[in-house]
Image (cartoon, rainbow, N blue to C red):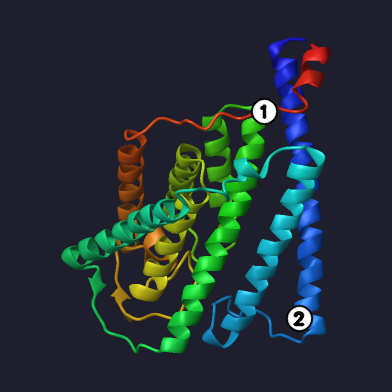
Amino acid sequence: MTTSSTGFSKTWRLLIRLLGFSLTLLLLTVLFSFVLFQVFGMSAPFGEDTEMADLNINSMIFFWTALTIATFLAIYLFWVRIDKDSWRLIGLKDAKGWSNFWYGTALGAGMISTGYVLMLIFGVATFEAGNFVFGSFLAWLVFFLIQPFFEELLFRGYVLRLVERYFSTWTAIIISSILFGLVHAPNDNFSILGLLSIALSGLLMGWLFVRTGSLWAPTGLHFSWNFFQGVIYGYPTSGINTYEIMANQYSSPGWLSGGDFGFEGSILAVLLLAGVFYWDLKKEKIDTPLPADPWEDELDTMA
């Protein structure tokens, strides 16, 4: 079999697996949503204008918890039961889990804080103190721990590892990062800079996942990036407004302040993410070898 036909076979097999996984996850999500919003009568997690209102924060926490459980079940079915692979590769079991989580958290908080200071210096941000409400703060803290974990479990824990089965590690990191950026396209005020920065954040989180072999490093970065962006500094988070401690105002030009999409729509986010990615890339090489693909023998037979 030629290299091109082998590549086509791998691509086709990958797409079939992704399709089966996606349909299963969608079915579980619909089922859990029906239970939450019809059986238990919870309010919808999003308001009519797609903003995350404090009124619906409890529903959002329950909804994303349900999404996380559905993702666990789908991964268990496809990764463990069908592919006969190990949970270890998903990155949940990590003896250095706490230190990896705090490392990622420090990176995210540092980048957002640096970006905020630069915006103050450039005059596109104006400091305004908001009202601290402990209940809202705690609810959003819980939400921003659950929601990023769900996305990391899905995009890094499963999608990246699955693509890595058929192609190189860097191909898997890049593809999962592009998909991660594209799923944010429906958000309000989405922009090219927003796509670029979110894809770059996916690239950085994918690299952290592969470098450490742990899901906790990218989860920490994802958590602090969202939490500091929205709750602490009052940016919109990927175009969505949240509860905020600082009621800051961000002015034009949008390419510098991020505008209504938030810090992720700023050139500063792109530069900071690229810089931190380059810095961490130079620290350590990938050292997370994968076991043999259980279907590799079939490819060899076809060749």
Q: Does 298 sit left or right of 65 as displayed?
A: right
Q: Residue 147 placed where, x, y %?
A: 56, 65
**How far is disc 2 from disc 1 in space, using C-alphas?**
39 Å
* Label 1 residue SS: helix
Query: Vertically, is 297 above or below 244?
Result: above
Query: Vertically, is 204 above or below 98?
Result: above
Q: Residue 45 placed where, x, y %?
A: 64, 78
* Label 2 residue SS: helix
Q: Residue at x 50, y 38 (%)?
A: 210
Q: Nearer the viewer, residue 118 or 260?
A: 118
Looking at the rendered structure, the kind of residue marked 1 is Tyr
| Residue at image mark 1 | 166
Looking at the rendered structure, the kind of residue marked 2 is Phe
Which quadrant: the N terminus?
A: top right
Q: Does 123 sit left or right of 11 as displayed?
A: left
| Residue at image mark 2 | 37
Taking the view exactly as shown, the residue that stands out farthest to the front is: 95
Q: Nearer the viewer, residue 235 or 217?
A: 217
Q: Residue at x 54, y 78 (%)?
A: 52
- Mark 1 neighbour density, 10 Å: few (under 14) some (14–19) many (20 or more): some
Taking the view exactly as shown, the residue that stands out farthest to the left is: 121
Q: Residue 9 placed where, x, y %?
A: 77, 24
Task: Locate residue 243: give its quadrant.
Answer: bottom left
Confirm or deny contact between disc 2 and disc 1 (CB under 8 A).
no
Q: Nearer the viewer, residue 193 or 292?
A: 292
- Mark 2 neighbour density, 10 Å: few (under 14) some (14–19) many (20 or more): some
Q: Residue 36 placed where, x, y %?
A: 75, 78
User: In this rendering, does residue 152 appear at all?
Assistant: yes
